[in-house]
């Protein structure tokens, strides 16, 4: 893998805990999104939901922060995907509480939904990362 592609995907390592912290951010965002929907802080307006707005906003904000900190595009995708999966876990396992535990867990691993949210995460994460990178570059340019 070329150095430029590697730097774009995972960023430059400036601290030994940088990459584990960015991966841990995804876990935090998953539970943040899940708890926001479960407590009613984030709501679904009804009907067919193609893009869960609040979960996407959480992922975009995290992707912007990753880009601003030069963390790597892969981590922006992961952060966006984790927040969307938090919404999906709420909808599949908590809101649709019909059936036994095996059916609810089975609804969490539907490949079509996981791929769909993955495509959304790549789109949202890329846009947020680019905006964060440009914003970070601008701030560093002005302050130097």
Image (spheres, rainbow, N blue to C red):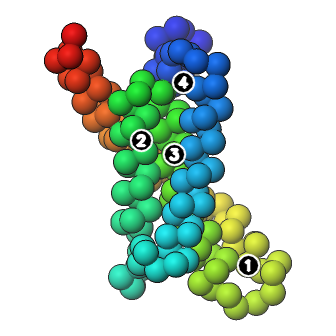
Most extreme residue toward the front is: 143
Local secondary structure at mark 3: helix
Callout 4: 10 Å neighbours few (<14), some, many (20+)? some
Which residue lies at the image location 76% right of the left edge and 72% below the top edge?
A: 105
Left or right of 36 in this view: 100: right
Labels 1 and 4: the sequence-earlier one? 4
Residue indicated by mark 2: 63
Name the one closer to the observer, 84 or 49. 84
Callout 1: 10 Å neighbours few (<14), some, many (20+)? some
Which residue lies at the image location 36% right of the left edge and 66% below the top edge?
A: 53
Labels 1 and 2: the sequence-earlier one? 2
Labels 3 and 2: the sequence-earlier one? 2
Local secondary structure at mark 1: helix
| Coordinates of residue 143 in the picture (x, y in percent) | 20, 16
Q: Quadrant of the N terminus?
A: top right
Residue indicated by mark 4: 10
Residue indicated by mark 1: 104
Q: Quadrant of the C terminus?
A: top left
Q: Is residue 99 above or below residue 81?
A: below
| Coordinates of residue 60 in the picture (x, y in percent) | 38, 49
Q: Quadrant of residue 15?
A: top right
Is the residue under label 2 in contact with that under label 3 (CB below 8 Å)?
yes
Q: Quadrant of residue 21?
A: top right
Local secondary structure at mark 4: helix
Residue indicated by mark 3: 79
């Amino acid at each position: 893998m070329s150095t430029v592609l590697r730097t774009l995907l995972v960023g430059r390592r400036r601290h030994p805990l940088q990459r584990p912290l960015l991966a841990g951010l995804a876990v935090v965002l998953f539970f943040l999104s899940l708890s926001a929907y479960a407590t009613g802080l984030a709501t679904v307006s009804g009907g067919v939901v193609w893009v869960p707005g609040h979960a996407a906003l959480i992922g975009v904000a995290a992707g912007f922060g990753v880009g601003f900190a030069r963390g790597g595009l892969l981590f922006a995708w992961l952060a966006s995907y984790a927040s969307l999966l938090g919404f999906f876990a709420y909808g599949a396992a908590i809101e649709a509480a019909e059936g036994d535990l095996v059916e609810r867990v089975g609804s969490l691993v539907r490949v079509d939904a996981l791929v769909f949210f993955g495509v959304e995460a790549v789109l949202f994460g890329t846009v947020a990362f680019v905006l964060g990178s440009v914003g970070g570059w601008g701030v560093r340019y002005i302050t130097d």
